[in-house]
Amino acid sequence: MRTGNEPLTARSPLRLRFWLSIWGLLWGVAGTAAFALADRMGWAITCAVLTIVVGADLMMVVHRLHQGPHYQPGRDVPPYEPLHDDDPPPPGHPGPPYGQQPDHRDGAR
């Protein structure tokens, strides 16, 4: 269900990004070491650059996670505030398209 205030209440999957960054960091380090030992310096440099990028992303994710629940709500915070029939639309909400009536699913019109 879309409420129109998604940009205000959007949540980022930081925990998933954290674990994917750890996974990428492990593979990047392993790839750098394996290609360096195999004397494939082009691939080793590519893996090293990828490891640096993944490490920078991991540092940013950890920083955002440490900022607390204001920036990363927990499981007990709902992802949106349900819209009630008597509430006015949020500011900047265009309303229903021209010529259409709002959908009243509860049968009251």
Image (spheres, rainbow, N blue to C red):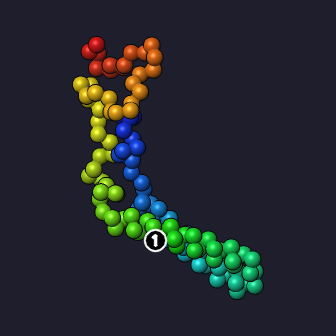
**Residue 51 rendering spot, x and y as whole percentages:** 58, 74
Quadrant location of the C terminus? top left
Residue pictured at 24% horizontal, 25% vertical: 86
**Residue 33 rendering spot, x and y as whole percentages:** 64, 83
Question: Is 1 displayed left or right of 69 in the figure?
Answer: right
Rendered image quadrant of residue 108: top left
**Residue 57 rendering spot, x and y as whole percentages:** 50, 67
Dot 1: element: helix
Residue pictured at 34% horizontal, 57% vertical: 71
Between 15 and 84, which is closer to the camera in this rendering? 84
Looking at the image, residue 90 lies above or below residue 39? above
**Residue 13 visible in the current orientation:** yes
Of all residues shown, which one is farthest toward the left?
Answer: 86
How many residues crowd around disc 1 within 10 Å: few (fewer than 14), some, or many (20 or more)? few
**Residue 74 rendering spot, x and y as whole percentages:** 30, 56
Residue pictured at 41% horizontal, 69% vertical: 62
Residue pictured at 47% horizontal, 62% vertical: 17
Q: Amino acid at mark 1?
A: Met
**Residue 21 visible in the current orientation:** no
Q: Which residue was labeled with disc 1?
A: 59
Between 79 and 38, which is closer to the camera in this rendering? 79
Rendered image quadrant of residue 65: bottom left
Q: How many discs mark residues in the rendered view?
A: 1
Of all residues shown, which one is farthest toward the front?
Answer: 92
Looking at the image, residue 92 lies above or below residue 26? above
Quadrant location of the N terminus? top left
